[in-house]
Amino acid sequence: MKRIEATNFALANDDGGATRNYEVADIILIGVSRSGKAPTCL
């Protein structure tokens, strides 16, 4: 269940346009576009 919750969290916050949930994130990935940071690439 935790994996599903983590994936849902990542998908909901994966646009990078808002910082609304940074304080509850365990990891924040940063990098240039098209470098495989999306949850489906992990």
Image: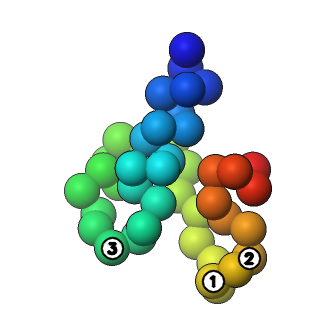
- Looking at the image, do the residues carrying marks 2 and 1 touch, with CB atoms under 8 Å apart? yes
Left or right: 9 with respect to 27?
Answer: left
State the separation of the CA atoms marked 3 and 1.
14 Å
Q: Quadrant of the N terminus?
A: top right
Residue at the extreme bottom: 32
Q: Amino acid at mark 2?
A: Ser
Q: Can you tell which mark lies on residue 33? A: 1
18 relative position to 36: left or right: left
Q: Residues within 10 Å of mark 3 (few under 14, many from 20)?
A: few
Label 3 close to label 1 by CB (< 8 Å): no
Instruction: Residue 29: name its quadrant.
Output: bottom right
Residue at image mark 3: 17
- Residue 16, horizontal then vertical, whole percent: 41, 70
Q: Relative to 34, does residue 36 appear above or below in the rendering?
A: above
Q: Dot 2 corresponds to which residue?
A: 35
x 43%, y 41%: residue: 9
- In the displayed orientation, state which residue is furthest to the left: 20
